[in-house]
Amino acid sequence: TSLGPVRCASLVIATGGLSIPTLGASGFGYQLARQFGHSVLPTRAGLVPFTITEPQLKAICDELSGTSVEDCLVSCNGQSFRENILFTHRGLSGPAILQVSSYWQAGDTIEINLLPHLDLVEWLSEQQRERPNSELKTILAELFTRKMAGLLAEHWFSSKPLKQYAPSELEQIAGKLSAWQLVPSGTEGYRTAEVTLGGVDTREVSSKTMESQKSPGLYFIGEVLDVTGHLGGFNFQWAWASAYAAAQYV
């Protein structure tokens, strides 16, 4: 170190990852791991909001900043999460977005079902039969906030009385709301990420003692390792559990 060599019988690396640098996060743990011959898998932000720059979609996000949709199904690369989403002035956030962000890579498409609890074709057809003179935006305001319904009707559809829509048009509306596809421009990065994906290769660390298999007496615990959990306290639990495991042997 800058104060000279440090000698000890055991050394535990509990430095965390790169997430939220304002709290002191740094790559020191990875640097030290490499110093002792460990492999460090590529790192990136996880459990993090998406940013949107595509002009029309960015305009919607800006207008709806602070608006949440309580029950959405968000999918990417074979993984799906059903929770709420939140529009922000930067893009999209909320639990379902944070969860799926850990499986997203730059350029990937995410798909959002804004109303997974409804058969929208059936529901829209029913509204058309019962309220043929009601406008689409008025009907959608029963599912979303009035502002969101108006914006979707303006940007995605041509709002008019329901009786003027052909069955195929109602199917297209239902399809858009049930399978909204978009490509985020990126994420908010480590600044707001709750976890760091990647890190010290777990294959080089004992799963029982957390001790390095390359340098006896060296231990790695918590987020510095390539272990990432879902939302809900799992990453805290991993930090505590791995610390307890190492403590039995240090």
Image (cartoon, rainbow, N blue to C red):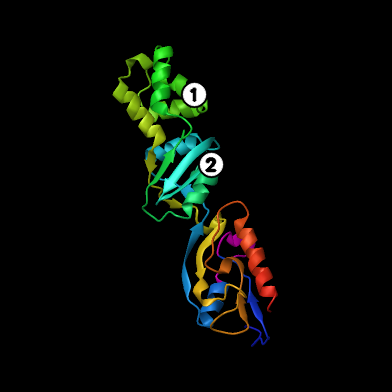
Taking the magenta stretch, the answer to whether it contains residue 127 is no
Q: Number of numbered discs present?
A: 2
Describe residue 139's horizontal placement relative to residue 239 as left or right: left
In this view of the protein, which residue sits in the foreground, 214 or 92?
214
What is the span of residues highlighted in magenta in the rendered image? 18-27
Taking the magenta stretch, the answer to whether it contains residue 22 is yes
Residue 117 in picture, x, y percent from top left: 48, 32
Determine the CA span between mark 2 and mark 1: 20 Å
The local crowd at label 2, few if under 14, some if 14 to 19, many if 20 or more residues have their Cα within 10 Å, is some
Whether residue 26 can be seen here: no
Query: Where, quadrant-wise, is the N terminus in this rendering?
Result: bottom right
Residue 200 in picture, x, y percent from top left: 52, 72
Residue 3, above or below 112: below
Residue 25, above or below 173: below
The local crowd at label 1, few if under 14, some if 14 to 19, many if 20 or more residues have their Cα within 10 Å, is some
Mark sitting earlier along the chain (2/1): 2
Residue 7: quadrant of the picture: bottom right
Whether residue 43 can be seen here: yes
Outermost front residue: 208
Q: Residue drawn 29% across and 25% down? A: 168
Residue 4 in picture, x, y percent from top left: 64, 87
Residue 163 in picture, x, y percent from top left: 35, 14
Describe residue 59's horizontal placement relative to residue 23 as left or right: left
**Label 1 SS:** loop
Residue 214, above or below 228: below
Q: Residue drawn 60% across and 59% down? A: 235
**Label 2 SS:** strand
Residue for badge 2: 83
In this view of the protein, which residue sits in the foreground, 98 or 71?
71
The numbered mark at residue 141 is 1
Q: Residue drawn 50% across and 82% down? A: 37
